[in-house]
Amino acid sequence: MAASGIPSGRILIQGAHLLTQDPDLKTLTGDVLIDDGRILEVGPDLDATGATVIDGTGRAVLPGFVDTHRHTWQGAIRQTGIGWDFAHYRKYIQLTWGPEFTPDDVYIGNLVGALGALDAGITTLRDESHIQNSPDHTDQAVKALQDSGIRGVFAYGWPSVDSNKWMLRGEATHPADIRRVREQLLTDDDALVTLQAMLRGPELSTLEVSSQDLALARDLGIRSSMHVGNGPWGPQFRGIGSLGKAGLLGDDLLFIHCCTSDDDELRMLADSGASASVSAAIEAVLPGLGVPATARLLAHGIRPSLSVDTEATVAGDMFNVMRAAIAAHGIGLSLQPEIYEKLPSFTPADLLAFATIEGARASGLDHITGSITPGKDADLIVLRLDDANLTPANDIAGSIVGAGHPGNIETVMVAGRVVKHQGRLVHVDLNQVREQASASRDRLLATPAAAD
């Protein structure tokens, strides 16, 4: 154990309820032995010799949550847009504040966003970064992920300057600076922070641009994500469908939202082996995106991952997303029973799988994380089941999904490193982070709003 009392080195979590997400181990009561950042053994009555013991009595242990889509750079302006529609989001985030972001703003936004994710038990974060206003902006975004201690996938996007050039059918191809990042900054695919591409796809650019962008990403040997099925743009431009007809689909693609993608497109998605990310919380509260596609994806054999999207308009934890998925499906059953009664239902256990192992698969990281499996990295969360809001935990998965919150999370570790201990982040100076985030927020919010 470290001098500070924070567990380190060889660690044994003992006597906990293990929701492993491993198809062989399933759910059991037992121990998890961790050493050199990895899971060594899982089972009952493991040998504690040489290990720091974490008492798992009255605790649930899960793989860390995986958020497959978050615009993390907006962390310091979180919750400024509660109740917005998409037009307001675009006006303030993309047209007003985005162009004003300095590299330092990007750094503190990414840092505070990643730390909030860790506090909420999210150990892997796909940072969908469309703040590439300069190479320095990009470098600071990456540095913040590395400094935060999170497992990060940096999905390199486009600038938040001259937004109309890059979105709304913009014809600019993906920034060539991504090649520098691949060749000089994020070269190691086994590192804690790795590189992917956030492409605009045919709904935000054109099919011709998408073809060139995909060719670039595939030449660099990285996976790509695209926003599709976004409100009226889905039926108008058919992002998945146009890619499918052009022979551009593949299992290296992650499609985000899919709210208004039609059934033919979802069949194409499934047949190609691509993945999907449901951002149920923001889809439920930001008018214009469309209804969360959770059950429609399941109907086509696609087990989705889950994501927060932006903290500007929703909370940054996975509990909120899981409950939003349930709520949206329930509203669908009430308002459109002729449609929703024909769709598959999903359980709390399903939602925990979407938030863990399915997120790891969608990120191309399921060989490293996403389940409590010997040999994988120890990305784990320990959650108190004896807190007042969860006791008695009559159905553990149901209790976590139905009533859990970040305050119930006692311990978080990433690759065996404990970053949250006894309910508090322990690897950063939060007072300093708070001061930097507040200064960034104050400056940005003082910017005059862009004209309508």
Image (cartoon, grey):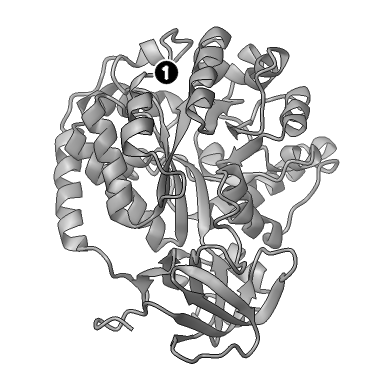
Is 267 in front, or is 323?
A: 267
Residue 384 visible, this angle: no
What x and y, as percent, mark residue 271? 77, 31
Q: Crowding at label 1, few (<14), some or many (≥20) Cα neighbours within 10 Å?
A: many
What x and y, as percent, mark residue 401? 60, 63
Is 286 in front, or is 185?
A: 185
Q: Residue, x 68% and y 61% (percent of image)?
A: 348
Is 15 in front, or is 135?
A: 135
Quick check: 378 left or right of 184? right
Quadrant in which residue 89 is drawn: top left
What x and y, as percent, mark residue 228? 59, 25
**Number of marks in picture:** 1
Q: Label 1's element?
A: loop
What x and y, as percent, mark residue 137? 24, 32
Q: Is residue 365 above or below residue 139?
A: below
Quadrant in which residue 294 is drawn: top right
Quick check: 133 left or right of 198? left
Q: Residue, x 47% and y 27% (percent of image)?
A: 220
* Circle 1: residue type: His
Quadrant in which residue 79 is drawn: top left
Residue 314 visible, this angle: yes
Please give the residue where the numbered disc 1 appears in the rendered image: 174
Tell me the quarter of the image containing the C terminus.
top left
Q: Residue, x 56% and y 40% (percent of image)?
A: 284
Q: Is residue 133 above or below residue 252?
A: above
Q: Is residue 451 above or below residue 263?
A: above
Is 100 in front, or is 2?
A: 2
Tell me the quarter of the image containing the N terminus.
bottom left
